[in-house]
Image: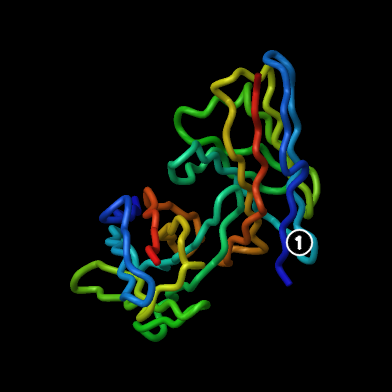
Amino acid sequence: AQSVTQLGSHVSVSEGALVLLRCNYSSSVPPYLFWYVQYPNQGLQLLLKYTSAATLVKGINGFEAEFKKSETSFHLTKPSAHMSDAAEYFCAVSDRNNDMRFGAGTRLTVKP
Amino acid sequence: GAVVSQHPSRVICKSGTSVKIECRSLDFQATTMFWYRQFPKQSLMLMATSNEGSKATYEQGVEKDKFLINHASLTLSTLTVTSAHPEDSSFYICSARAVAPGWQYFGPGTRLLVL
């Protein structure tokens, strides 16, 4: 069975500061890993995904994530936070059949 | 490409009535569709997986007689919440996948409020 754990249900950063959202996974097979963003009352938007190619994955809106097998982690980062980054972020894991399991989510707040 | 739509986007109904939510893959054929439920400030929880032309597979704890899923064509799946109650109020999100292995593409969600 696969699962992901997102450390920190709420992260607050100042505008311009580094964003770091943590995700650790558990999987018995090589995983696919995803980060999604959700704005209020909207669906999910895919930020980036890891598919066993490059371990450093670049996504949209300046986000990137690094797959670290030794740490079973897939943390999401952005060098400089923008007010528009305030949203809920979900990490997800899937197997090769792409049956996905989501983390509990991390709410990102950006302070001016 | 790979657009998934849901209809309606928002629905309010009275307790005891049934509500149908449609999920459509607009530019690809989806052999598998997934239905998720998201309560306020919580994550997405998979409710069921449906394959075109066969019965849906429900996750543990999801009542199949209450949440009827029909995946009659390769571009349409419907979720019917029967005899809805206030505790069924939630955000329902579908996703569609062309073939396995393949990516899931998510719909915009349907907000259900049962009064």
Query: Relative to A12, is B62 above or below?
Result: above
Tag count in the figure? 1
The answer to which image quadrant residue A108 occupies is: bottom left
The answer to which image quadrant residue A106 occupies is: bottom left
Query: Relative to A2, is B50 above or below?
Result: above
Residue at 48 percent across and 42 percent down: it is B45
Q: Looking at this rendering, what residue extends furthest in the left direction? A: A70
Q: Amino acid at mark 1?
A: Gln
Residue at 24 percent across and 67 percent down: it is A72
The answer to which image quadrant residue B35 occupies is: top right
Task: Please tell me how crowded label 1 is: few (under 14), some (14-19), or many (20+) other residues with Cα within 10 Å.
Answer: some
Question: How are the residues colored?
Answer: rainbow
Query: Relative to A95, is B33 above or below?
Result: above
Residue A32 seen in render: yes
Q: Nearer the viewer, residue A41 or A99?
A: A41
Query: Relative to B85, is B58 above or below?
Result: below
Q: Nearer the viewer, residue A19 or B60?
A: A19
User: x and y percent of residue A52 in the render?
Assistant: 40, 78
- On-image quarter of the N terminus of chain B: bottom right
User: x and y percent of residue A3 in the render?
Assistant: 34, 53
User: Which residue position holds label 1?
Assistant: B29
Q: Looking at this rendering, what residue extends furthest in the front direction? A: A112
On screen, residue B110 versus residue B36, left or right, reads right
User: x and y percent of residue B97 in the render?
Assistant: 64, 60
- On-image quarter of the C terminus of chain B: top right
On screen, residue B85 versus residue A97, left or right, reads right
Residue at 41 percent across and 81 percent down: it is A57
Residue B53 seen in render: no
Callout 1: residue from which chain? B
